[in-house]
Amino acid sequence: MIRLKNYILGFYELFYPNLCIACNSHLLNQEELICTKCLYNLPKTNYHKEIDNPVSQLFWGRTKIEFATAYYFFHKGSMFQDMMHKFKYSGLKEIGFILGKSFGAQLKESMFNQVDIIIPVPLHPKKLKKRGYNQSEWLARGLAESLAKTVDTKSLVRAIATETQTRKSRFERWKNVENIFKITSPELLEGKHILLVDDVVTTGSTLEACANIILEIKNTKVSIAALAVA
């Protein structure tokens, strides 16, 4: 029976090969979407090992952040950029979960394990309906699995739809997200250390806007984890 199952599986993969989304090599049985070699070669920052790293410095003098990090460097024209495009725009939401689990395994041995709740940066309902999923939520769920934390997708909402941040200046990005987020259940976050999660941090304007509204709640703390820094 097992031999027949393996034969059928092998026949299926002959016509529908299970390939790495980055390099197109055949995946081994334990690999999901991305081969081990590509995962190993992705450009890691290791910023979670430094309190005063370049991501945390983005928020100095702007808002009170406990810790901040990004897992990878985002370089234009790179394999990682292609992977992120597939994650964000081509429906391969599982990429976020896989990379989130890997990210969380690293953060588990750092100060980021102090957080209580993980909150992904929300999409406006119109954009969520159009895209079909929130890429930051899939990343947050991967992180949560490794960190054994709870994901909250209800307490922080994007109340106003905005234009894309692409090609905007730092000031324009900040104005574009000013006062667009709302808290629905402040009592659930009171006294909690929140880990805000986003896919890519550039100027930090969106994360700053989210952090500011959360920090209005009594005795809250905010840390930040982005999948990549551009």
Image: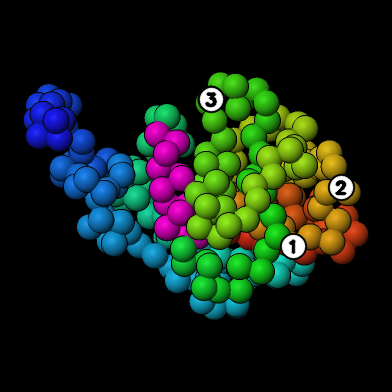
Mark 2 is surrounded, within 10 Å at the Cα level, by few (under 14), some (14 to 19) or many (20 or more) other residues, namely some
C-alpha gap between disc 2 and disc 3: 27 Å
Q: Nearer the viewer, residue 185 or 157?
A: 185
Q: Amino acid at mark 3?
A: Gly
Residue 49 appears at what percent x and percent y?
Answer: 51, 76
Q: Residue at x 54, y 78 (%)?
A: 50
Residue 1 appears at what percent x and percent y?
Answer: 14, 30
Q: Amino acid at mark 1?
A: His
> Which is closer to the viewer, label 1 or label 3?
1
Quarter of the image for residue 133 reads: top right
Residue 105 appears at what percent x and percent y?
Answer: 46, 63
Q: Amino acid at mark 2?
A: Pro
Which tag, 2 or 1, sits closer to the chain's start?
2
Q: Nearer the viewer, residue 201 or 136?
A: 136
Residue on which the image places disc 2: 186
**Figure check: 12 above or below 18:** above
Q: Please provide the residue range marked out in magenta.
A: 92-104
Residue on which the image places disc 3: 132
Q: Is residue 60 magenta?
A: no
Q: Residue at x 72, y 66 (%)?
A: 65
Residue 117 appears at what percent x and percent y?
Answer: 69, 55
Relative horizontal placement of residue 51, taking residue 6 as reference (left or right): right
| SS state under label 2 | helix
Relative horizontal placement of residue 136, taking residue 10 as reference (left or right): right
Quarter of the image for residue 90 reads: top left
C-alpha gap between disc 2 and disc 1: 13 Å
Which tag, 1 or 3, sits closer to the chain's start?
3
Which tag, 2 or 3, sits closer to the chain's start?
3
Relative horizontal placement of residue 8, taking residue 96 as reference (left or right): left
C-alpha gap between disc 1 and disc 3: 29 Å
Mark 1 is surrounded, within 10 Å at the Cα level, by few (under 14), some (14 to 19) or many (20 or more) other residues, namely many
Report the disc number at residue 193.
Answer: 1
